Amino acid sequence: MSGATSAFQRTGALGCSAIAIALEACAAWLAFTSGQDFDRDQSEALARRAVASHDYEVLTIVHLVNACYAADAGDETRAQEAVHAAIETARHHWTMDEFGLMWGVLLPPSLRLLAGSLLEADRLQHVN
């Protein structure tokens, strides 16, 4: 991550909030997956920053990552809310590609089933 951060600093692209948010989210995810301590509340702050910058692609992914963090902490309600938020963001802001690429990779099986059920209910609502 330090190599990516320094490369973006040299080009001045790190000032772009979307890139900064994505790099911070990646660093937190790497810490999480490697068992290191990290601030889970920081990820909620990243979601708020993504909304403020209108970066809905990153917001969709941050919601999915937050669902993983909540599930790992044993907070199923918060995890389900984050999955629902990711789907709503994807539907309303045309980021279903990002959602479709990442939900099967990031989410644990129980949350994948929830996401699949929500997507199917949405599809049926539009069909009928």
Image (cartoon, rainbow, N blue to C red):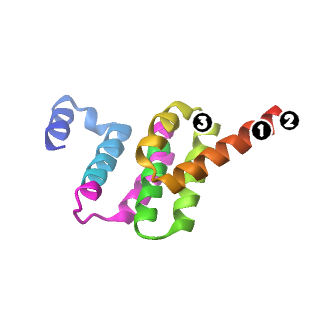
> What span is colored magenta in the figure?
31-59
Give the percent coordinates (x, y) of residue 63: 48, 51
Of callouts 3 and 2, the N-terminal one: 3
Residue 81: x %, y % from top left: 58, 59
Residue at mark 2: 128
Dot 1 corresponds to which residue? 124
Tally the marks: 3
Q: Amino acid at mark 2?
A: Asn
Question: What's under tag 1, amino acid-wise?
Answer: Leu
As drawn, is 118 to the left or to the right of 73? right
Quarter occupied by residue 66 = bottom left
Under tag 2, what secondary structure? loop
Crowdedness near tag 2: few (<14), some (14–19) or many (≥20) residues, C-alpha within 10 Å: few
- In contact (CB < 8 Å): disc 1 and disc 3: no
Q: Are marks 2 and 1 in contact (CB under 8 Å)?
A: yes
Q: How many angstroms separate mark 3 from mark 2 (CA)? A: 23 Å
In the displayed structure, would residue 119 be above or below residue 35?
A: above
In which quadrant is the C terminus drawn?
top right
Magenta segment, principal secondary structure? helix
Residue, x 22% and y 63% (percent of image)? 36
- Which residue is rendered at x = 59% and y = 48% of the image? 115
Label ID, residue 93: 3
In the displayed structure image, the side of residue 127 where residue 59 appears, left or right: left
Q: Is residue 116 above or below residue 48?
A: above
Magenta-span inclusion, residue 112: no
Question: Residue, x 73% and y 36% (percent of image)?
Answer: 123
Residue 71: x, y in percent? 45, 63
**Which one is in front, 17 or 66?**
66
Is residue 45 covered in magenta? yes
Q: Quadrant of the N terminus?
A: top left
Give whichever of 82, 17 is nearer the camera.
Answer: 82
Inspect the image, locate mark 3, and give the three-letter code of the amino acid beneath it.
His
